[in-house]
Amino acid sequence: MRSPSPRSPSPNSFCAQDALLQAQFTVWSVGGSSGGSSGGSSSGADSGPSSPAGTVSLPSSPSSSTYTLTLTHTHIHVQKICPRPGKEAQILLPLSELAGCSCPRAPAPPVLLLYWYPMGRRRRGVAKRRQVRAYLAESRPQAENWNIAVQCLLRGIDVGVYTELNKSLLPRPRRLLLLVNPFSGRGLALQWCQTHILPMISEANISYNLIQTERQNHARELIREISLHEWDGIVIVSGDGLLHEVINGLMDRPDWEQAIKTPVGILPCGSGNALAGSINHYAGYDMCLREPLLINCCFLLCRGGVRPMDLVSVTTSPSPSSASSNQNGCPSPPKKLFSFLSVAWGFVSDVDIESERYRGLGSARFTLGTLVRLASLRSYKGRLSYLPPGGTNATLEVPSQTPHRPLSRSITEGLEGYCRMPIHRTCSDMGLSEQRSLQKGEREREREERNRERQMRRGRGRGRGRGVVRASSLAEDREREMEAEERMGGTSGSSARSNGKLESNEEEEEDDSTQNMLEEGYDVDEGKEAEEKMEGTSGSSVESSERLECERNEKCFANKEGDEERWNEMDGTRDLKYDYSADEGRDEEEEAYSNPDLRKVVRKNSAPSSQIATAFFSRPIGADSEQEAETPAFERDGGDLNGTFFPRGAFPMDPARERALTISSPFRRSRFSLSKPKTSVDQNKNQKPSVSKPRPLSLLQQSNSNSLPPKFPPLSLSFSTTSPSSPSNIGPHTSLPSSASSSSFSFDLVQPSGLLKPRPPVTFPVDPPPLDDLLPPLDQPLPTRDWVTIEGDFVLVLAIYQSHLGADLFAAPHAQFDDGLIHLTFVRAGISRAALLRLFLAMERGTHLSLTSPYVSHVPARAFRLQPLSSRGTLTVDGELVPYGPLQAQIHPSMARVIVGDSGVKITRF
Ligand SMILES: Nc1ncnc2c1ncn2[C@@H]1O[C@H](COP(=O)(O)OP(=O)(O)OP(=O)(O)O)[C@@H](O)[C@H]1O
């Protein structure tokens, strides 16, 4: 465990001349018993604060123990002086572990309450735990002075020995807008608000206004219109999806440039909680989930450090409903949105969307989703282009000379007749360097083996019927290329090509060698045809050989088992085997199928998964793949300008899958809807009986408040910790217009806020929209300089800009909030299930970067373009479904600001 706070000096090393204040206090016992072994009484050590809205129940009576408290700039030193002074009766409370302090008003006794959150042992690792320490002062002014001094230090206001302590030193309490999605995660957000969040932020003297979202996009609409200067921060109590709405709401505003600088925070109540995981990690805390993660993040929020965070602008294709044209008959423009977390395609987005149906499991839904998806692994054809960090902005540098010959099929496939310009600065393989590092002798042996395997696979692939996506085509391309190179006896330049980082003087050489390759008949397209001819002159012979192979296997198996039932079982096995075909080429599985004993094991282990998957997906596993490639993507879809792929029509989605995506999710409204979409509110209503949702807090249902704008939430809760008479009391809730129709509830401990005057409409200066200076429009070719393009079959593409993809998925260990980088991970088809599982398991610890697999690549980038060439699939941005089709993104360094606590460098306070 890395220590989140500066090393505490030992009590003995405490130096009296550092003292700002020193006084004697009596400890109050908790519930009649003496508090903690040393240093005063403590309460609520294990649980979060139990009373909402800052009502701290005082200890019942003073104890006979007396302590001397000494305040320094960094610690409170507590020394027991009576009845038994001694070394063991000392304790140091680091100020960095205090969330806040208070001094209850008269007639309460003059007690100084310190809210201390040291690290404590949990079931898994360590996390923050709450302790309240209560010290009875000799007089009220003494208690109040201490309260002011500690609060000043916690807020970063310098206090000296001679500073005259009075309330005017204190800055006004921070004001937070809390947006709660009551249905996020396992639906515990409101409950956790009551038990953990509201008490803790009250302890930190933070004023807040809580709004419950009622539907998807509610938060986005709200953020578009509120007066932002009234808030010190916007904090979402939910998963990452709600923060995505808030960020986009801020960017929708005409004053977006200013608005996006509003600090945003997250209190994790969702299923993934990726940003919360990153914040927790950045603070140096152990990885944790659920309430420990929430308490850690809430503590960091109370500490209040803010730092810059990169945003990524993502341009997606128009949604299918508007893809063809808008009302004027003009083609709909691509959509732009802003992302703080990730863009995912393939495995990751599939798991995210499909696991919606297991939402009740919380974060375990992703584990189950991963297993299900592993059981029916798919691959997707596509093209990924990215601009590495060193690359320049070459958007306008479009060369006009004659195109170079393309490097390989992976670049040229499907571009004939479309490609006006070549993509010559390309990398057509992933992990190739590892393959190439093999010795030549080994290579030859392997080549022969691979040839045999390839032919087997090819035969089986065809036998399975049309349309199965062949997951290993890119690998095969590379193999063919390698063979060609070896036959040519020239290996120079090949490794350079594989890296895709050629200097310009190498390009000629590269093109020449490619040209030679092509002339010698190793153009991969031609090679493919030749191979096909070699393998069999007609598909029927392949099919018949496939049949023979199957029959042989079946007979062999049947003889061994010897009864009809076994035959039926074996049929199931065979289906399973075929269903698993998307990433064929995996040695382990092939071995399993060729070895009857292993085969039994595989069948035994796999059948339940396949049944689960079939039941979940209401269709045979692999159905997607079968339908997928019935027609080549380029025949079905529209034109392509130098690698830019545009669908002519909407990407179709079958009704069963559409149902699966929409009905199972109470939250997400699929953009693929075939039928007229219902409103989210209705969806939620429909979902309520099936998904156990918490009842909203009864408190929230009272109709009383004047704290919210009329058009906004009917349910809200606001709270101010300060007196309305103090200058700091002009809380956000007091400046919002009242609403007769609103059922919001104003909750002020001290004095209810008065009726609110309507606020004149706010006018914003209109800022020009942020430009993507690294990218041409989505329908234009990419620049040829500096960009790297990879085409082939992918299992997943993940672009992430935070360290965590989920609270327990450390996907980009090097990522920083403001490193100006997109961390790209892509896995190409051909990877075995075991290797993919290993990758995800290693990701939990962040050790996956050291795993070597020729199918897995990790690269940093500043911009990328993703062009799915498979007609069906899912794309997500920050875990939210976006229209399937070409998409591009670029980083905007330090565009936003995120509340991360004060344990990092370069922190400013909000
Ligand atoms: N009151 C609401 N009813 C229905 N949907 C909502 C409501 N409030 C927000 N949403 C939407 O719910 C979706 C999911 O919310 P969120 O991401 O916060 O939770 P999650 O999916 O459980 O968490 P995570 O994204 O971390 O996995 C978002 O798309 C958000 O727009």
Image: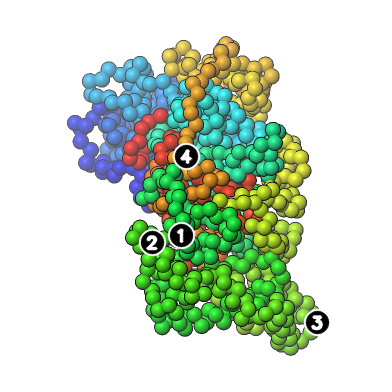
Distance Cα–Cα, label 1 vs label 4: 28 Å
Closer to us: mark 3 or mark 1?
Answer: 1
The amino acid beneath tag 3 is Glu
Question: Is the residue under label 1 in contact with that under label 2 (CB below 8 Å)?
Answer: yes
Which of 462 and 190 lies nearest the eye of the viewer? Answer: 462
Q: CA distance from mark 4 to mark 3?
A: 64 Å
Measure the C-alpha gap from mark 4 to mark 2: 28 Å
Element type where label 2 sits in the image: helix
Q: Amino acid at mark 1?
A: His
Query: Looking at the image, is mark 4 or mark 2 earlier in the sequence?
Result: 2
From what the image shows, is residue 852 above or below residue 222?
below
**Which numbered circle lies on residue 507?**
2
Q: Quadrant of ligand 1?
A: top right
Q: Nearer the viewer, residue 71 or 603?
A: 603
Q: Is mark 4 in CB contact (under 8 Å) with mark 3?
A: no
Tell me whether the residue at label 3 lies in contact with that at label 2, contact meaning CB atoms closer than 8 angstroms: no
Where is residue 197? Give x, y as percent.
52, 35
Residue at image coords 52%, 61%: 411
The alpha-carbon separation of the residues under discs 3 and 2 comes to 63 Å
For label 1, the residue is 404
Residue in view at x 63 percent, y 42 percent = 318
Q: Which residue matches tag 4?
A: 772
**Can you give x and y, in whole percent of width and height, for residue 429 in the image?**
48, 64
* Badge 2 or badge 1: first in the primary sequence: 1
Please name the residue shown 69% across and 61% down the image. 631
Tell me if residue 343 can be seen: yes
Q: Nearer the viewer, residue 411 or 565?
A: 411
- Residue 255 in the image: above or below residue 301: above
